[in-house]
Image: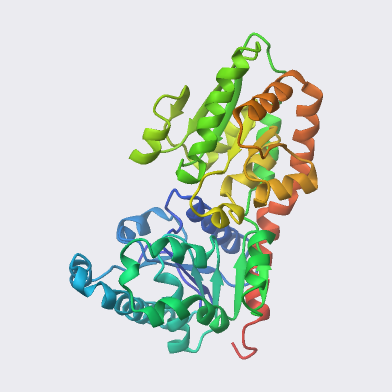
Amino acid sequence: MSNEPQVKPGTIAVVSHAVPGGCSGQAVMLQRLGQLAAEEGHGPGLLFVDTDRKALRRARLAGDLPVEPIRVPWLLRKLNRLRGFRHRQFPWLVRYRARRIAAIVRRHQAAAIVGCTGGDLIDVPAAIEAGQQTGLPTYLYYFDDYAVQWEIAKETWLRDVLPPFRDASESHLLEQAAGIIVPNETLAEDIYQRTETPTVVVRNPVDTQGYAQLRDQFPRRQTDPVRPLRIVYTGSVYTAQADSIRRCSQAIAAAALRGIEAVLHIYGPPPDREVQAELHDTSIVWHQSVSPEESAAVQVQADLLFLPLSFTCSYPQLIRSSAPGKFGEYLASGTPMLVHAPEDSFPVRFVSKHDCAAICSNPEVEKLTDTICSLAKDAAIRDRLGKAAIAAAADFCQQRNSRRFVEFIQERMPANR
């Protein structure tokens, strides 16, 4: 008897480079959707088609959730190193991956396909083509804006892709999709400008009940004026956060001159060399990566949570529509949050509407220093923001968003399926 998770007919096949068993925000979000579908039994379960190079190893880390890995053939990986073949490789990979996806969904009698954006531009067109091969409706899950990711990729090897395929890709894919799923209204507004394909907002799901239990386990304590303010960031640090994190370190140093002692703690994997170079002379306490459960406990016990987004990123439209996975977690923790991000970004717009976090949308160290000092000195403001954050976190509830995800797909599936 196989120990592999069983897949029931009628399941939804989710194609992604990040799946349950991974540590990225996208992997964690999909795992929460998959777990709830399996536990509650409302509607179909989820089958994950893993397109990452490390898929075979990661498939063993997904627990009870079914994961089917796809590996890139050795020959195609070899040809990728030859510049003269790059213009042909992208469509080859799309067709190859589409055939593999189609074979998987036929074998498991899936009822629909969901292609996720993220780290691999091939997944979305491959999912659409697999849907055409199998006759299944295909949905696109925009964790990030595919159009912007395409623009970024043009600066690398994709500049050699055949121009007709490159220039027509996203508009064609949007029209072919049965529906589009996005994590926030800002990205939804952008999609509405490009297509009439039905679109729904499914927020990055958070176990709000689990956070409520943690808040009971670790009651909020009054800030001790003798103890440095514990400012916490949980997650990976990329160029999308680096300049704001550096500014936070500088603001902490400036706050010390005003009598406010604080320390920035970061829990996450070591950043790449470019980010390390930008942050090399900052006073940051780095901690190793922790599990989602451990991260939640760290968030609840912090004095202040820091949510940074870049003011200097080369692609501000990607920052504007970004929906950090930790955003809903920060809200659910009940710990007062400081959002340091451009004014038109989704997190700033959301917390402005709900008045559930402190905001510094000015890229000046002095302004950020003022905000940190104000929070450190005023317990009433921190308490009010924490309570407002818990109320706002209800919109990120895991059950609510998992149901919204499944119902959106089921409502648009052919009636005979």
- Position above or below: 268 against 304: below
Which percent across, then down, holds residue 347? 66, 48
| Quadrant location, the C terminus | bottom right
Determine the image quadrant of residue 269: top left
Residue 189 or residue 41, whichever sits in front = 189
Which percent across, then down, holds residue 251? 58, 24
Residue at horizontal 64 percent and vertical 50 percent from the top: 345
- Position above or below: 394 against 275: below
- Position above or below: 205 against 174: above
- Position above or below: 178 against 240: below
| Quadrant location, the N terminus | bottom left
Residue at horizontal 70 percent and vertical 32 percent from the top: 336
Residue at horizontal 36 percent and vertical 77 percent from the top: 94
Residue at horizontal 53 percent and vertical 59 percent from the top: 30
Determine the image quadrant of residue 51: bottom left
Residue 328 or residue 320, whichever sits in front = 320
Residue 78 or residue 160, whichever sits in front = 160
Residue 174 placement, left or right of 210: left
Asked whether residue 344 is in view, the answer is yes
Residue 349 placement, left or right of 287: right
Which percent across, then down, holds residue 296? 58, 37
